[in-house]
Image (cartoon, helix red, strand yellow):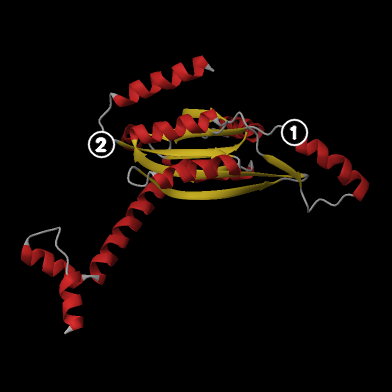
Amino acid sequence: MIEDRIQILRRAAKVSSRENNEHVWCVIAGNEKLVDDIAYQAITAKDRVQILFRESIKILDKYTSKRFDCIMLKGETLKISELRNRCNEKGGASVEITNVHINEMPNLLVIVGPEESMKSFNGKTNRQNAKINILAEDHTSSFIKAELNTRFKLPSFLRNTVTPILDMSDVVLSAILVSVIDENDIEHVKEISQNNSLFGIDLNKTIQDKENQRIFEVTEKDKANPQEENKTEDNNNPDNTIETPEEDKTQE
């Protein structure tokens, strides 16, 4: 426990030496309770970090269904580091995406799923010559929920026998950040991940879409308040508003 704390302090010291205004992205995966906790911490620090999306994923195979949650964040480097440390302490998996990754590494994907499925994915990309570079990886130490697939029909006595065994099984999640070397292979790599029951995130597309959404929301807000903009420009005072004049006019 003491060694873990020392490692956390060392990581925090490294992070604190970076620029305070630097922002990074992060994908965290784990069971529902863990991601609920991370989401709560992000919401309470919304001035320093934002939630880009959260997904609850259910993976079905012939016999079982596996459930886990995934959340993507963007925020200050130090705050993201705090959330990653909290995630690791509680047994989740996380990968960080920096501006260096975004600007210098091509065709970025984050892929999350059960460890055995991840091994199969890596094997198939090698055999099918879809060249990827694994830039970062992490694994959960707490386990996700596995259940008997309800589509798989079993007699009641067999289902009652199998279900407790699944409840006791340990399903480890892996999360990796990969760069697809050839742009033409992106869709093929996505297809391989889907065929292996993995959850994939196209980072370049996701980040671009979220930025476009942010710009759209700001534009729509400006359109909805044209008088406020004009008033602000006339007074040359960004802190001024038109709330008081509107109230006075109503009273008249």
**Quadrant position of the C terminus in the picture:** bottom left
The residue depicted at 45 percent of the width and 16 percent of the height is 6
- Say what amino acid the circle numbered 2 marks: Asn
The vertical placement of 69 against 104, above or below, is below
Residue 174, horizontal then vertical, whole percent: 58, 33
Relative to 172, 27 lies left or right: left
**Quadrant position of the N terminus in the picture:** top right
Look at mark 2 in the image and give the residue it sits on. 21
Q: Is residue 134 visible?
A: no
User: Is 165 in front, or is 115?
Assistant: 165
Instruction: Determine whether the residue tagged by mark 2 lies in a helix, strand or loop.
Output: loop
Instruction: Determine whether the residue tagged by mark 1 lies in a helix, strand or loop.
Output: loop
Give the spatial CA distance, label 1 vs label 2: 43 Å
User: Is 105 in front, or is 208?
Assistant: 208
Q: Is residue 109 visible?
A: yes
Residue 143, horizontal then vertical, whole percent: 65, 34
Tell me the crowding category of disc 2: few under 14, some 14 to 19, or many 20 or more residues within 10 angstroms, Cα based: few
